[in-house]
Image: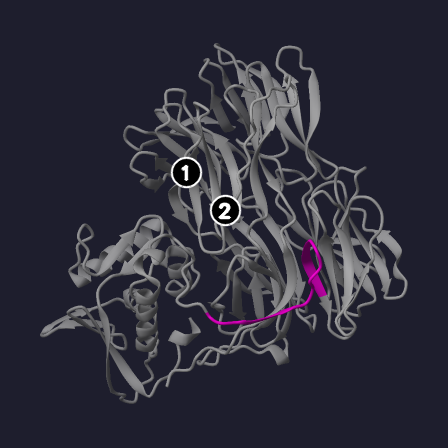
Amino acid sequence: MGNFENSNPQEQKLLIADWQFDPARCELSQGDNVVKLEPLLCDFLQYLASRAGQIVTREELLEHVWQGRVVSDDSLRRAVKKLRLALGDDARNPRYIKTKPLQGYILVAKVSEQKVPKVKSSIGRWPQIALITLLAAGLYIALGKQWFEQGAPQQAEKTPLKETALTSLTGSEIEGSFHSESQRLLFTLRNHSNEDLHLYTKDLNSSFVQKISHGEGNFYRGTFSPSGRKVAYSHQSNQKEHPEIYIADYDPALGLSNVKALGVSDNTNSLSSWSADGKSLYFFYETQHSDPWEIYRYRLDNGTIEQVTYSSKQGYGAFYAKESPDGRYLAILKNLVGRRYAITLMDMQTNSLVAERILNFFSDKILWLDERSIVKTKDGSQANLVIGSFKGDIYYYSIEADRLWEQSGTAPGLNDIFYDCGPRCFFMRRHTMNYTDVLEVTNPFIPATSTPRLQLESNKAEFHPIYSHDGDALFYTQKDENQAVIVRHKLNEEPQSLWTFNPRHVVRELVQSPDQRFLAGRLEDRLFLLDLESLDLKFISSELEKVGPPSWSRDSQAIFFSRIKEDNSDLYSYQMSNGEIRYKEGNISYLKQLADGRDFLIDHDLKLHQVDGQGTRHFIQAFSHLSGSTWQIQNNYLYFSEPTYGNTYLVQLDLNNKQKRKHLLAKSPDSWEFHIHPKGDRLLMTRFQAADSDLVKVEWPEPTQAK
């Protein structure tokens, strides 16, 4: 966005088809016909023009036009409608703005540039727009219209970057930390999928690599203290249910010593970062499954733990904190609801709120920038920090200007920033996208058969597989760096791409209607409905809702889902006949109707019940989280997955005598989801494997200056 907001010796006007557009005056004109635009519509049109011929996503509009403000889908549609009205456009036969369902909008009209000598004025909206427009239009022609219309990540251009390897070990190097004074890397390594995670260091001066963690279980999320003489890390023992956070002294010759546990292993916890002075450690902690995550601070001098944040129950809460290098500010990341995040900045001296900014992308890491890493836009806005994510997003943020802008040229296979090495220079992780496979395994609780078992082979990542109701096809999602798709794969046929979406997004909890005509699921946290004949897809919930997973009525006439609030969950039904959403019952998070007439529900406390013909509930099992893809009723058995000591087990519960049997499903806590074949003899699951990844130094060039 910085390229659109810089001074230029000439004032620019644009020709958009037969309209002359004057951004400085916010006017459209055709001869004597002059249409005055509202400032918001003016910015909207100018941004579309700067991306002429490209799909502009909702997220991009919220960031660049609405400046991160919370905006409903209806407000966005009203703005589009007003702009079409001003242009005399027809949504059904668009000559200017075309809607790409579920993706965004495209300015399809021809855009050209007019330049006139600049008159002295303090007004100047995005003066370099014409240059960006021509570059974008050329890219559109060069890469092909089809690529942009298939939902790939919407980048105006692929920015060339310089990439230098920091590690090149066999396996997967992740979760890097760097101490610049000693020029030493700390990272987690897994050589093979069935091996434990361990901590390693590498001296960049000598290229000497050392393994510094020893013993059973997984050691991960290691981070150097500011002095480099201490290391904090997490350890998941094979003998304990929850991970533990540890602090240890570190010496290159001796390794780790004086190891001490923080004592917060009772429930979910995750190490965040050191304080600037190295005297405290930040981590997030979830006291109960229904409580939001909160940030806590552990003080090394006296061993006390202090709560830092107090979140509402809407969203998951606060999960990452990082102090500025001088210790004055504390930046906190928190989840508000679904895919909506926020960054909060606190002044540590006055305990006052400095800034809070909505983030319309998944975010999980913060880097504060120092003087050697200054990044500025041409209008003088200076970035104070960088926000990154596992999905490859990198955004700069200026506190003073309250501005957020994206680093161009990012991709999902390049992620996890952990050190800034100069302007637009970061230490990151580079990995292949082939880190999961879909495979079919025998139901371990029934006699083995000789039926062949499937395994999908590709160089991409596959997720969330389910069988069709007749068992003759699979549905799953597949992604690489360029795009993600929902796939239908019939036996002995080529896979069919049903719908394409952004690879930074997640589609999950797919469920087919009993009549096999539709597929429902969640894109991030929005419910969608996909017609398997026309391949039309529509959303049935908004981004502002927090909803549970979908399920179908046994007659295929309704989709059940819950709207989750702070203190309860209400069950609703979406009517297929007219699209009406009806309230059904309170305090229910999930309803499953089986073809044999049985009903099962999960209440707000995540307890599974069977409901008899009189409406009486009979308790069966309590779950740790809400999902429709981690449990299944097959005949008179309940199957559910259960993570224990870093592994995932498949549990079979006899509904008649309540007896349980357990079998190891995967040596990983991530393989929760499964789906049993209609015959009951086998099941589908996602197998996570050690992605071939290395730590790298990435340098992006300075943005091209307009001449």
Name the image quarter holding the C terminus: bottom left
Name the image quarter holding the N terminus: bottom left
What residue is pinned by disc 1? 494
Which quadrant of the view contains residue 233? bottom right
From the viewer's perspective, is the residue at label 1 or at label 2 nearer?
1
Identify which amino acid the numbered label 1 is placed on. Glu
Identify which amino acid the numbered label 2 is placed on. Gly
User: Could you give the CA–CA distance between mark 1 and mark 2, rounded to whole angstroms?
Assistant: 34 Å
On screen, residue 476 above or below 49: above
On screen, residue 387 above or below 23: above
Residue at the spot x=27%, y=80% of the render?
Answer: 12
What residue is pinned by disc 2? 338
* 379 magenta-colored: no
Residue at the spot x=34%, y=34% of the render?
Answer: 532
Horizontal and vertical percent position of residue 88 = 15, 60
The stretch of residues the image draws in magenta is 159-177
Residue at the spot x=43%, y=35% of the render?
Answer: 489
Depth check: 422 or 317 in front? 422
Which one is earlier in the sequence, the residue at label 1 or at label 2? 2
Badge 2 density bin: few <14, some 14–19, many ≥20, Cα 10 Å? some
Depth check: 573 or 145 in front? 145
Horizontal and vertical percent position of residue 671 = 62, 37
Answer left or right for 3 relative to 110: right
